[in-house]
Image (tube, coloured by chain):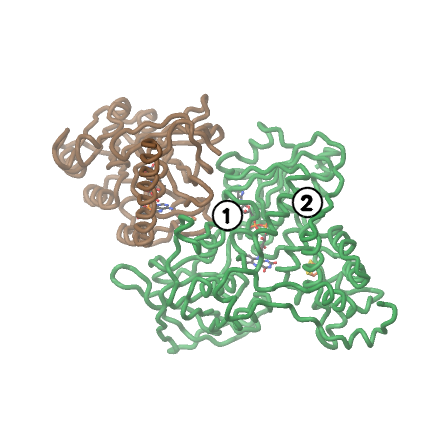
Amino acid sequence: MQQQLTAKERMKIPRHHMIEQDPLERSRNFEEVNLGYTAKMAQEEALRCIQCPKPSCVEGCPVNIQIKDFINLIAEGDFLGAVHKIKEDNALPAICGRVCPQEEQCEQACVVGKRGEPVAIGYLERFVADYERKQGKIEYPTINKSTGKKIAIVGSGPAGLSCANDLVQWGHKVTVFEALHELGGVLVYGIPEFRLPKEIVRKEIDGLRKMGVEFVTDAVIGRTTTVDELMQEEGYDAVFVGVGAGLPWFMGIPGENLVGVYSANEFLTRVNLMKAYRFPEFDSPILDCRGKNVAVFGGGNTAMDAVRTSLRLGAKNAYIVYRRSEKEMPARVEEVKHAKEEGVQFKILTNPVEFIGDEKEWLKAVKLIKMELGEPDDSGRRRPVPIEGSEYIMDIDIAVVAIGNGSNPLIQQTTPEIETSKRGTIVVDSETMKTSKKGVFAGGDIVTGGATVILAMGAGRKAAKAIHEYVMEGKW
Amino acid sequence: MFKIVKAEFLAQDIKLFQIEAPRIAKKRKAGQFVIIRLDEHGERIPLTIADSDPEKGTITIVVQGVGKTTKALNLKETGDTIMDVVGPLGEPSHIEKFGTAVSIGGGVGTAIAYPTAKALKEAGNYVITINGARSKDLVILEEEMKQVSDEAYITTDDGSYGFHGFVTQKLQALIDEGKKLDFVLAIGPIPMMKAVADVTRPYGIKTVVSLNPIMVDGTGMCGGCRVIVNGQSKFACVDGPEFDAHGVDFHNLADRNKMYSVYEKEALEKFEHECKLDKKIEAIENAG
Ligand SMILES: Cc1cc2nc3c(=O)[nH]c(=O)nc-3n(C[C@H](O)[C@H](O)[C@H](O)COP(=O)(O)OP(=O)(O)OC[C@H]3O[C@@H](n4cnc5c(N)ncnc54)[C@H](O)[C@@H]3O)c2cc1C
Ligand SMILES: Cc1cc2nc3c(=O)[nH]c(=O)nc-3n(C[C@H](O)[C@H](O)[C@H](O)COP(=O)(O)OP(=O)(O)OC[C@H]3O[C@@H](n4cnc5c(N)ncnc54)[C@H](O)[C@@H]3O)c2cc1C
Ligand code: SF4
Ligand code: FES
């Protein structure tokens, strides 16, 4: 079919929009917002790809998925072939297809997008991954003969999981240590169900388990066991540290300890990991948002997740308060769009100055100040500066601070030979992900600071390659 | 799954458990705690490691049944299991030879103070322990405390045993006797810890309290456990739980700890109702 269409004809096909739950309905439930393409839609969307001889989308993807080839397979109707093609470079397509900022990566680079809307690479990736999962016959890669080498992976986020995925295939004995009681890192405690169903993450982990990866939950490395003990006493030949960026920043303004002020991590963890939205069926509570005014401070994915969660918990008014303009928001474009459709109110160029409480220290309002954009700062974005005298008070019942995360110092404190930067991130060789300590590698948010799932995944795989070489050849 | 190898009540509503957790038993130091989750639907709650036996691979916790989770835990018996036990968490107590060290425990705080009192003794301090309870039948770990103390006092609010009055009155009495106290550790209900801080402040006696804010992960990830110490926000699960008593904002801690009281009440009522139903069904089955 594909051969019959010229590039011009293909470019005339309009981009297929995602089938979504109705905004009003979905803003009150926790089910997934995006419902996915049908097979017909996927094939038609795949036809929009003009099969560039030098596909720029591949360059745009941080792990260089063979996008052109997998899309061609979809156009031909070989959906399983397509997903296997993706999996050569990305172990977690069902997840990346849902959470990657495609508009800044593959889709931004897509040539079709120069004239109109780019090929929906993310939706296609998601479609084939879901297709494989739903038809139930997941093909597991063959596992090489045992090398007798033991590798410890610290942290079960995308970095750790993808590292484990490669190493176990190459015949190593892989054990993943996770501090929490659930596996998946931010994918389970941070990103909500309505964006990434936990079932998908669980399936990926089950797959790894079937391939022979061992998982140990409730193990805080640095406390329960140290990196040194893993290597010296428990016989691990190498350790990969993928502990993420999980230390929430607060703003340091008055009133931040009032009852009703949450970090986004806590707010989302209570809901996603502890299932507080199903209290009292689950024991962990969260402050009742029904009929309340909830303000979320920040403009990233975390902020969007928190504010949309508050709507689903029944908030009457849900606000995003962000100090720059919408253009500077680091969140995925789709999340901002979804948040708006669901009724989130955006207060941009606005910053909090102080939280105000009652005599029992319960939050009742926030003092805000208007901002304007000044000169560009280090990040190249225009620096927001407060407009004098523009303060005003907004009544709120719950505040969620989502201004980012620093790195948890636990591992570095207990293994001081692992060199860290001033910001607390672990310093590595960018090709091999080697840290300053022999046998120890690191990757993901603990190295980059809060970044993306695909970058963490890519880092995990880079490290896997270097770990393999190191344990097989013994050369550091 | 973590197996309970010993379970016994020390007093009404206060139960001691020994749990198999070899990695934690080996690693833990005085002042550290675990977070437990009873089952798939359970909350994560922090409990101090009162003791451990690295050889046997067990840790000891002492639990006061105050709400749904602790009461459900206290229904467990030897041979039962706990789904998740993670630790040891928190910074260990800072132990050194201070000279004369006083360990004050209120209620179940006695059990929390015990490992630190023991460590203070082992570090060569002259250890005075003051342990308070509402009445005689609620006094716990009397023998254990005696063994690690040079002087051991019990106080009861109703005077049914030991010194009649609050732990702070006993502490004040010691100071008034002219005893030179170099270090005070106080663990118990927030008003008690605040009162101890108020007693020692004018004398400039170094005083440490172990704070009990509401926690979730216990690893520094959520910030829910933040407390104000010397005007600064600290995460009790990683920076504490022990802090300089004279710098703690006890009001803020007390207010934050009440944050979920409506939900806690609801959960407890539901739980007690279900327990009653279970008992009724059991009775009917036994009769039939
Ligand atoms: C709410 C939210 C929404 C996001 N949305 C997106 C999105 O839409 N798209 C996107 O690309 N990115 C998104 N991100 C960012 C992305 O999730 C992260 O960049 C990515 O998860 C980093 O992966 P990681 O493996 O490095 O760490 P993490 O996913 O953070 O996993 C680290 C794991 O290590 C565990 N751990 C930590 N310390 C220890 C220890 N001492 N011992 C044992 N285990 C330990 C943690 O419990 C955790 O499970 C989002 C982040 C958040 C918080
Ligand atoms: C570091 C630390 C060590 C502790 N050690 C002990 C101990 O050794 N023995 C003991 O009996 N108790 C200890 N506690 C207190 C114990 O964690 C609480 O009593 C328990 O969480 C109450 O849970 P519940 O469901 O039974 O009661 P609830 O009815 O849910 O709560 C009763 C009160 O306990 C507090 N609380 C509730 N949920 C939590 C939570 N997730 N984390 C912390 N506090 C909470 C609140 O102040 C609440 O008002 C400790 C607390 C901390 C922070
Ligand atoms: S992984 Fe992300 S960047 Fe790469 S092709 Fe898929 S959606 Fe695009
Ligand atoms: S309990 Fe979450 S940071 Fe301390």
Q: Chain of mark 1?
A: A
For the residue marked with disc 2, what is the amino acid?
Ala
| Picture residue at 83% right of the left edge, 73% below the top | A7
Tell me how far mark 1 sits from mark 2, CA to CA: 20 Å
For the residue marked with disc 1, what is the amino acid?
Asn
Residue under label 2, please give it: A463
Q: Chain of mark 2?
A: A
Residue under label 1, please give it: A408
Q: Position of residue B264 (x, y in %)?
A: 32, 50
Report which quarter residue A129 is drawn in: bottom right
| Picture residue at 35% right of the left edge, 71% below the top | A395
Q: Is residue A238 visible?
A: no
Q: Position of residue B254 (x, y in %)?
A: 28, 51
As helix, strand or loop, the secondary structure at mark 2 comes to helix
Q: Is residue A102 visible?
A: yes
Which of disc 2 and disc 1 is earlier in sequence?
Answer: 1
Share a chain, discs 1 and 2? yes
| Picture residue at 66% right of the left edge, 59% below the top | A97
Q: Which chain is brown?
A: B
Q: Quadrant of the C terminus of chain B?
A: top left
Left or right, A378 with reference to B35? right
Establish whether ligand 1 lies closer than 8 Å to the Cβ of label 1. Answer: yes
- Which hue belongs to chain A? green
